[in-house]
Image (cartoon, rainbow, N blue to C red):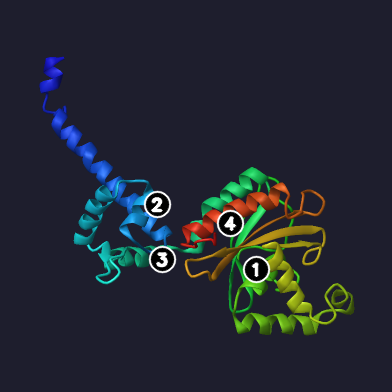
Amino acid sequence: MNHLMNSPSAPHPIVARDRRQRVQAVTTGIVLLKALARMGGRATLTGLARQVEENPAKVHRYLISMMEEGLVEQDPVSLQYFLGAEAIHIGLVAMRLADPLRVAEPALLRLRQSLEMTCFLAVMGNKGPTIVRFEEPGLPVTLNVRVGSVLPLLWSATGRVFLAYLDDSRVEKLAREELERISPEQRNTLDARDPIGVLKRDVQAAGMAIVRDTNLQGISAISLPLFDFSDHLAAVVTVLGATGSFDTSPSGPVARALQAESRLISQSLGHAPPN
């Protein structure tokens, strides 16, 4: 035992304790930065200490250290602490790396495996909503859409989410062009006075789009928006399957699973949902 204690490979108790203290200090600093971000990036010492349930004197010591590193600054007038230039730089780099396709890939795999359904990610392209990632279960439903397929704005669940949440004049233009080409039968399924406006409001009210046999005969789909750090619609995630083979209600298990994954993806893109 004494030999092991004196072995060069075994850390000295004081050294080991010092390492643990440094790790704990880093953890505490991260907790404070995250709390400051949750509070809008600016807070008083008392408010921040209350937020993390720590002694103000201890919080103050950590803030001084983070100020020395440029992670936190203090307003000389209000004496509030706010995120500093280095914290902003870290955030900007993280935002540049927040690619929807990369971030959403694990979620698509989880959805395919847990639901055993086809799911895909779409972004807004020059011609309309475009599929950029496509995942199929072991026994896929026969479809004529793949990566690169462009979906309609009015008839696909994916397109309706883009129509409802993407503030872009070209989206409205594409939707009106689609409206001019539809058949009388299709026109009868839309609101007579404000077909595009009603579609938008219905999706926004539900927080998702659900279609049954409107884009592909015999196929139903549920789509949800993915937002980035600026509350901008970054992409749309969709699950689809044979009509009647799954619950397409907004409160059903498929919709709930899709909601959970869409929240995680949006958070990874820097989106902060409203309280």
In percent of width and height, residue 99 lies at 46, 64
User: SS class of the residue under badge 2?
Assistant: helix
Residue labelled with disc 2: 51
Instruction: Compare marks 4 and 2 and give the one earlier in the sequence.
Output: 2
- Do the residues bearing badges 3 and 2 touch, measured as CB atoms within 8 Å? no
Residue situated furthest top in the rendering: 1
Vertical order, 181 against 55 (above or below): below
Task: State which quadrant residue 180 falls in.
Answer: bottom right
Q: Secondary structure at mark 3?
A: helix
Disc 2 residue crowd, few under 14, some 14–19, many 20+, Cα 10 Å: some
- What residue is disc 1 on? 149
Of the two numbered discs 1 and 3 on the same chain, state the one appearing first in sequence. Answer: 3
**In the image, which is nearer the foreground, mark 1 or mark 4?**
4
Q: Amino acid at mark 1?
A: Ser
Check disc 4 and report its element: helix, strand or loop.
helix
**What whole-number distance in Å separates the C-alpha atoms at marks 4 and 3?**
18 Å
Mark 1, mark 2: which one is toward the viewer?
Answer: 2
In the image, is 82 to the left or to the right of 40? Answer: left
Proximity of marks 4 and 2: CB atoms separated by less than 8 Å: no
Q: Which mark is residue 95?
A: 3
